[in-house]
Amino acid sequence: MRFFAVVLLVLGTLAAPATAEASRGRPWLSNWRGWPHRRALLQAPPVPAAPKRAGARRAGFVPLAAGANFTVAAAPSGIGPLANGTKPKRTPVVTRKLFFTLFQGDRDACTTCPDYNKFPNDKATLQRQWRLFTTAEKELKFHFKNASEAAVFFGNMKVIYGGSLDRILEACARAGTPQKCSAGPKYYGRGPVLITGADNYAAMGKFLGLDLTSNPDLLLDTNSTAGWKSALAFWALAPEFSCVGAFIKGPPCPRAARNGNVAAVTRRIVPNECVPLAARTTPAWKMQSDRISAINSVRAVFGLPPLNPMTAWCGKKGA
Ligand SMILES: *[C@@H]1O[C@H](CO)[C@@H](O)[C@H](O)[C@H]1NC(C)=O
Ligand SMILES: *[C@@H]1O[C@H](CO)[C@@H](O)[C@H](O)[C@H]1NC(C)=O
Ligand SMILES: *[C@@H]1O[C@H](CO)[C@@H](O)[C@H](O)[C@H]1NC(C)=O
Ligand SMILES: *[C@@H]1O[C@H](CO)[C@@H](O)[C@H](O)[C@H]1NC(C)=O
């Protein structure tokens, strides 16, 4: 799965297993499609156009195994109609300053790409992306409830986004070889959470009221809120999107994230990473540890103490 280390983004992309055998030894690659694991959106039934209200539940994304009945716990958190139509005053969790701090100075990880370093996170880019991000939040009536939640979201994003806010797509495609991408040359991962696969594009497009099937590149449009909206919607607006694991017991991503429960979030978005302690020399373990590091560096930006990697680690029993 791909929501992770930039290094793995590159490696995974350029060295995608050609055979089942190859992927067997590398379970993280057999399931490397991006945070929005494609299966989570398989067989999505028609969904009304753009959500009318934040928090509108999308009943009906048929989850995973045929015949299984999963329920998604509680309302998606971090969003939702404000009580009685009143708008409580609140300081946004993600301020412009924090946003800039999070992304400025990041280095382009795609060193072999033809457009390497052509899209730096410079001031103009940060300002435009900040506007897109806040506009996306408004359009979806979404806000992060607290810094811990935002840190898990951005930490998960940062571990795979590749270092250029204006060029968030799988390295296989950025390198000019989209045919090498696991999801094929059209529906490779794009946008802050790397929406990947025809079914995910279709379902997310329906959810957002955008034709992402005809125009997957909309998620890359540097003047469109579509990319950020796909990320925020995936994270929280429709629990059936967020989390591989609508079928895994536990709190939805945002709620787990607010409590700093990275393990619960990981189990939902990349369960393959949750290997036992004995596997700590494996790439899956490394990915989990990169993820926790990324989340901790974002937490530092938000003024939060680091999580203990061993406690946060999702392979730990009971974590
Ligand atoms: C799922 O729910 C449907 C209708 O509520 C029911 O007919 C079916 O047997 C259930 N399947 C399982 C595996 O529980
Ligand atoms: C808003 O709704 C809640 C219950 O839903 C109620 O307790 C509260 O008094 C309401 N506030 C206003 C200002 O109407
Ligand atoms: C879109 O964004 C780019 C920067 O990425 C900018 O140079 C360009 O002028 C914008 N185009 C439109 C139509 O706004
Ligand atoms: C975020 O909210 C959760 C509860 O929803 C709380 O336990 C946690 O301490 C909060 N974290 C921060 C950093 O405010």
Image (spheres, rainbow, N blue to C red):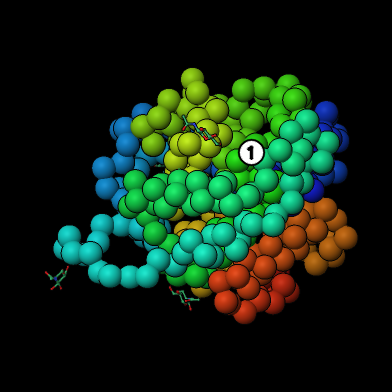
Q: Quadrant of residue 190?
A: top right
Where does residue 271 sit, x and y in percent of width and height? Answer: 65, 53
Where does residue 276 sit, x and y in percent of width and height? Answer: 77, 63
What is the tally of numbered marks visible in this picture? 1
Q: Residue furthest bottom?
A: 305
Q: Which residue lies furthest to the front in this view?
A: 124
Residue at left offset 76%, top offset 56%: 287
Of residues 154 and 249, the one drawn nearer to the viewer in this rendering: 154
Where does residue 297 sit, x and y in percent of width and height? Answer: 67, 68
The N terminus lies in quadrant: top right
The C terminus lies in quadrant: bottom right
With respect to residue 63, does 158 lie above or below?
A: below
Q: What residue type is labelled 1?
A: Arg
With respect to residue 171, does 192 lie above or below?
A: below
Residue topped by disc 1:
167
Residue at left offset 77%, top offset 46%: 109
User: Mark 1: few, some, or many residues within 10 Å (few <14, many ≥20)?
Assistant: many
93 lies left or right of 48: right
Of residues 4 and 74, the one drawn nearer to the viewer in this rendering: 4
Is the shortest distance between ligand 3 and the CB of mark 1 under 8 Å? no
Is residue 20 at least partly visible in the picture? no
79 lies left or right of 311: left
Is residue 145 at least partly visible in the picture? yes
Q: Quadrant of residue 305?
A: bottom right
Q: What element carries label 1?
A: loop
Where does residue 148 sit, x and y in percent of width and height? Answer: 52, 70
Residue at left offset 32%, top offset 36%: 50
